[in-house]
Amino acid sequence: MTSPESPVGGHVPVAGGLATGGLKYAAEIGAETVQVFVSNPRGWAQAAGRAAEDEKMREAGLPVFVHAPYLVNFGSPGAETLDKSVSSVRHALRRGHEIGARGVVVHTGSAVSQPFDDAMRQVREHVLPLLEELPDDAPDLLLEPMAGQGAMLCATVDQLGPFFERLESHPKLGVCLDTCHAFAAGHDLAAPEGVRKTIDLLVQTVGSGRLRLVHANDSKDACGSFKDRHENIGAGLIGERPFAELFRHPEVAGVPFIIETSGRSAEPHGNDIATLKRLRDEG
């Protein structure tokens, strides 16, 4: 059954301020929910933010999510990268709290050149304290599985199991499912029953209620390609139908959908959001 409570939105640019720039773009594309960066996504510099912009974001009433910088990797064998990853995610969680965000998305990372077990020991050692220090009204930490390339620690949804085990299934721990990543990693969302099987496996692995955000992206490449190349909704190899099926899965009811699709202007993003709203509302 379709849930009309599943808001649909997009990742928004924040030039000019989180609220001044971000909310303006959100209105242009018809977003009911937004995702933002609160610092440089490709660097370690941490922006302090502005109180007036933070207040406007809180008052806007939209579900807000923060995406941590791409450099974050708790599985890295490099001490400097590991230390900066901890600092960066702590900063994202703090800034997320200040703007009233529901969650902070972090990629599950890569072991790079070290054994999987060593990388996962680092995950426990450094991520569990971050979870433990969160107040109840702080954002959740949302793990986003990757597309499967290289020495990724997690790609398919069942590979979230070791993360939840080592992080003691902490109540502030959740999942962000990227449809392009899942497809690239081998979950054939375009196949009959593909969506149901994927979400059922996710629930079987981490429990009900852990899926807290969907990154809704079509894929330029085939299932199992291990290539993370997003396409506009319906224009890729996943197609429209699986997104409609996602809205109908009981575990996805009420979960926000965020697009991270192609295009550098409001028009293609607005079209993708309109398509998802139609698929949601058609039932």
Image (cartoon, rainbow, N blue to C red):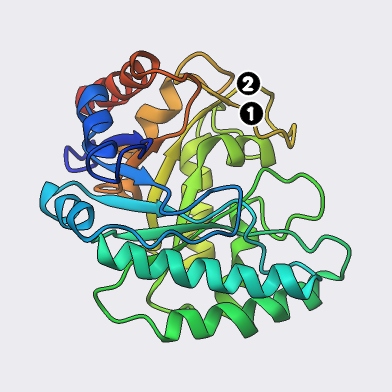
Residue 31 relative to residue 119: left or right: left
Q: Which residue is mark 2?
A: 220
Query: With respect to residue 63, does 277 lie above or below?
Result: above
Residue 229's disc number = 1
Work out whether residue 137 can be spotted. yes
Residue 226 relative to residue 13: left or right: right
- Three-letter residue code for mark 1: Arg
Q: Position of residue 73 (x, y in %)?
A: 67, 63
Q: Position of residue 16 (x, y in %)?
A: 31, 38
Q: Residue at x 56, y 17 (%)?
A: 236
> Callout 2: few (<14), some (14-19), or many (20+) C-alpha neighbours within 10 Å?
some
Q: Position of residue 231 (x, y in %)?
A: 54, 22
Q: Residue at x 59, y 41 (%)?
A: 182
Name the foreground residue: 153 vs 195.
153
- Three-letter residue code for mark 2: Lys
Residue 101 relative to residue 117: left or right: left
Would you say the residues marked 2 and 1 are in contact, meaning their CB atoms lie under 8 Å apart? Answer: yes
Q: Earlier in the sequence, mark 2 or mark 1?
A: 2
Distance from the alpha carbon under mark 2 to that under mark 1: 6 Å
Q: Quadrant of the C terminus?
A: top left
